[in-house]
Image (cartoon, coloured by chain):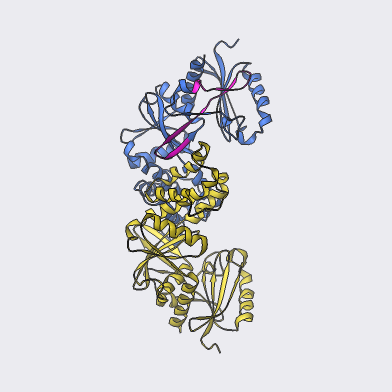
Chain colours: A yellow, B blue
Amino acid sequence: MSDGRFIAIDWGTTNRRAWLIERGQVLAAHRDDRGVRAMASADYPAAIAELRARFGDIRVLAAGMVGSSRGWREAPYVPCPAGAAELAAQLLEVERDVWIVPGVSHLGEGRADVMRGEEVQLIGAVAAGLAPHDGLLVQPGTHSKWAWMQGGRIARFATAMTGELFDLLRRHSILAEMMRETPDPDSDAFALGVARGAAGESLLHALFDVRAGTLLGLRDASAGASLASGLLIGAEIAAHRADMAGGVHLLAEGPLAAAYARAIALSVATAHVVDSEAAFVAGISMIEEMRR
Amino acid sequence: MSDGRFIAIDWGTTNRRAWLIERGQVLAAHRDDRGVRAMASADYPAAIAELRARFGDIRVLAAGMVGSSRGWREAPYVPCPAGAAELAAQLLEVERDVWIVPGVSHLGEGRADVMRGEEVQLIGAVAAGLAPHDGLLVQPGTHSKWAWMQGGRIARFATAMTGELFDLLRRHSILAEMMRETPDPDSDAFALGVARGAAGESLLHALFDVRAGTLLGLRDASAGASLASGLLIGAEIAAHRADMAGGVHLLAEGPLAAAYARAIALSVATAHVVDSEAAFVAGISMIEEMRR
């Protein structure tokens, strides 16, 4: 019935993106704001029925926060090293031919880490030839993921709360009034922040300078958001300097891609920007193939 | 008329503490929650009149956020190095014999910093013999101050947003559900956090472990607040390790004093806890003497 067609969903906290895919090719796409946060448990079957009415009554593969304790149903975490085969082996069927892709976990160096959704992009970026089989990939965002790939599988990874911290500072902190502008990656304030963050300056101290520097007239208040953004991204880079010499592949679009590409270029390496939608489609197609 | 008596106020964001002082001795004290945040500009004269009705129609010296742009009127910042003489010389009279103590600023190493209120405790701790003329003093809190004293004056200082960041994470972040308990400085989780923070582990990454470690069963969710607190205080200590070998004087009380004393003892040095109220009284008395 399906002709190898299936529906893929990247179901995150705030958004949902869906594609009708056949043999790795996108036939149609849909995007809306029905993220996990906007859904109650009982809403999921109708949301799937609506997508099937649009794309056909075929298999559905969903990845992301939909498989978390805040989503539809909790899918397992597959431990690193994790590739398409390991993910396909642990798919969770939540209703007739609707499958949730597991997350990935990492335990090591006394540290724990988890991801949900990013794993599909990571293995897909390699599968699509957009990133090397062995290399360092970064997905910036609310919770940035730094992933070390080996043989096309996720060997280990580390999450940085960079985006969430920026958002907390901007919305709720004493720095809020200095962070109203949109950060400008081409500004001097951003470059200064990156330099200081990447040099390992204490974030707890450097962030207060966003306020103090304005109060003492070192810079205009409008530079605060760019300085804070640079400090945070710079601190994120500082943690991985040693592994970045060989270049970094960046799964991102728009302003986030611009900010990270510039921060990485300013500090240590070249960033290769990878189309994260193409990576997701390649990754979910590979999981679907492994599944059959 | 005043017999050398005066009213001292430590007027912070959320609280106000007032003392009737004569020749460095406290004759009476008062504390309420009429902090700057609870006051409109027009409320200050009546709040002073009320204290004078209680303590006498005498001179008032007020320090803290009352002198900020969010307070009664903005008092200047005195640049480092700053001692009692420099502060006394810049007192701002806001109404008949009501004086606001200036804040202190530091510009150096491309960095700006400011304080308001802490300066009185710092110089007072030395004046009262509670801390050495040359040494490192710490006032932990929402915005922790690390101050290097030379000859009893504040030579330079650095602010860490430790307390505010803890509060933001606990109230608004994805870690909130793992941070409901009160941090326990005697717990293993706190010690682990301090060790990792003080070793220079990336805060952006380590904080996410508060969540991931619970999800993967490394620790109980009840340990999250202690781990996060340890990580943050440890990171604060990491920034000043090199200067701490000679010991640290800690201006704090209660749980905050306990947490910092333990974190400092665990990582590098001995913390000597100083009575911050006694330090404030000594500091404001010295400013009042210099003023006359």
In percent of the image, x 40 and y 77: which residue is there? A85
Q: x%, y% of residue B2?
A: 58, 12
In the picture, residue B151 is in which quadrant?
top left
Magenta residues, as a range?
B87-113
Q: Quadrant of the N terminus of chain A?
A: bottom right
Quadrant of residue B216 within the rendered picture = bottom left
Q: Is residue B250 left or right of residue B94?
A: left
Q: Residue at x 43, y 72 (%)?
A: A125
**B232 up-or-down from A132: above or below:** above
- Left or right? Give the position of A52 relative to A63: right
Residue B186 visible in the current orientation:
no
Q: Residue at x 45, y 56 (%)?
A: B208
Query: Per the image, is B92 magenta?
Result: yes
- Residue A8 spot, x, y in % from top left: 53, 77
Q: Position of residue B196 (x, y in %)?
A: 36, 50
Picture layout, residue A210 above or below residue A72: above
Query: Would residue B193 be counted in the magenta stretch?
Result: no
Q: Is residue A221 visible?
A: yes
Residue B59: percent from left, percent from top: 59, 17
**Total numbered labels placed on residues in the image:** 0
